[in-house]
Amino acid sequence: MEKLRIRGGAALRGTVSISGAKNAAVAILPAVLLSDGVCRIENLPNISDVSSIIQVLHTLGAEVRMLSDSAVEIDPRPVRSCVVSKEAAKTMRASSYFIGALLGRCGRSRVAPPGGCDFGVASHLRGASVYLDVVSVGATINIMLAAARVRGMTVIENAAREPHIVDLANFLNSMGADIMGAGTSVIKIRGVEHLQGATYSIIPDQIEAGTYMAAAAATRGDVLVTGVIPKHLESILAKLIEMGVDVEEYDEAVRVSMRRRPRKCNIKTMPHPGFPTDMQPQIATLLAVADGTSIITEGVWDNRFRYVDQLVLMGADIQVDGKTAVISGVDRLTCAPVRATDLRAGAAMVIAGLSAEGVTEIEDIDHIDRGYENIVEKLTALGADIRRVRVDAPDRQSQVV
């Protein structure tokens, strides 16, 4: 067991490089199963979710060779199984993407919960028109994967438009797929018989970038965030600017600096190109120390405010009513023992600890490791006092690692 120990109060300053996008990686890696040749995937984030996806590919029979921490070569031709076991699927929600990938490859798939459901046999798959009642990233990705190699035209209406949807389409097209409209609400997929191997580099992670920008603002620091696509960050940057954060955009970098207390701001999370739900906990932490009362409305998930109790332990004044949180800003957060209730909530606790007075300890950090590569090392390079400590379970004693 490990936890993070953060001594807050230091302004983050310097440069941080952003890793490949988690949400793109966990869709592109299963898509390799549709190939008839070897694929090389580059700019992979070195995170536990990616490691879990690679392990599933290995258990299915794929030949996997790690070329570095950020590149892998995968040969899916030896794969004979269409079953993802409970043990393989239980570590991550993204294992559900094997449903579409295996349907496209084998015509059938069986993926255990929590990653998905038993889809049984779907022989003689054919293209069709699909209208999504609710915009869903997972549904859009699974339909794209299943349709890429089936006969006929598949049309997805009310499709998700996130950057990682576009990245998946670009990867599939690089293998020979015929996909049009990714990034819009209508995606057309003309099935092809074969997909060849390809080399592909994953886009940078917009949520990791947004997290470091929020941390810079919360600590009243000055950070250059490099290796990003600024267009993917537009909704996040717009709200930071509204809160009084100084922002400078470059071709592949964004500089964020803050010299004052943030201003209040109202936010509603929405599917892309709206404000991303995956940035909601991080931005709420920044608003917790803003001047005035802010309102956050969650427009995507039902249960995204579970982290609020942890912020309240640190002195935040937040009232939640259903999908709405009313945040009355306080001058400063104070240290407290807290835990990461999920991936993005864990990032929020890190931001809170960096900006708070005293030493904050965060438990259940395996959630954070699912989506943030080398977060301790990156923050330390920016001047943060943060340590990963090992916890001895029987007596709860801990030591720095």
Image: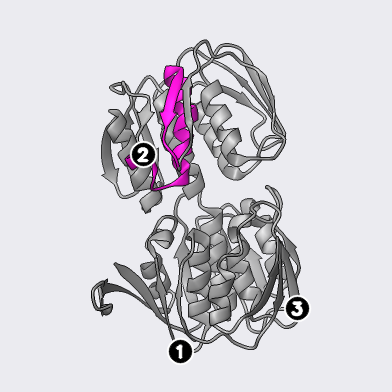
Q: Identify the residue position indicated by label 1 in the image.
A: 358
Between 175 and 297, which is closer to the camera in this rendering?
297
Q: Secondary structure at mark 3?
A: strand
Question: Which residue is rendered at x = 69% and y = 33% of the image?
Answer: 132
Residue 289 lies in the magenta-colored region:
no
Q: Position of residue 94 (x, y in %)?
A: 47, 42
Image vertical order of residue 301 relative to residue 13, above or below: above
Estimate how packed mark 3 is, as few (under 14), some (14 to 19) or many (20 or more) residues with alpha carbons within 10 Å.
some
**Secondary structure character of the magenta stretch overall:** helix
Q: CA distance from mark 3 to mark 2?
A: 45 Å
Who comes first in sequence, dot 3 or dot 2? 2
Residue type indicated by callout 3: Thr
Who comes first in sequence, dot 1 or dot 2? 2
Res 152 quadrant in image: top right
The magenta stretch spans which residues?
A: 87-113
- The answer, for residue 250, to whether it is visible in the render is no
Single out the mark in the foreground, 1 or 2: 2
Q: Secondary structure at mark 1?
A: loop
Single out the mark in the foreground, 3 or 2: 2
The quadrant the N terminus occupies is: bottom left
Q: Are marks 3 and 2 in contact (CB under 8 Å)?
A: no
Image vertical order of residue 147 relative to residue 166, above or below: above
Res 32 quadrant in image: top left
Between 318 and 265, which is closer to the camera in this rendering?
318
Q: Which mark is residue 293?
A: 3
Who comes first in sequence, dot 3 or dot 1? 3
Q: Identify the residue position indicated by label 2 in the image.
A: 86
Residue type indicated by callout 1: Gly
The quadrant the C terminus occupies is: bottom left
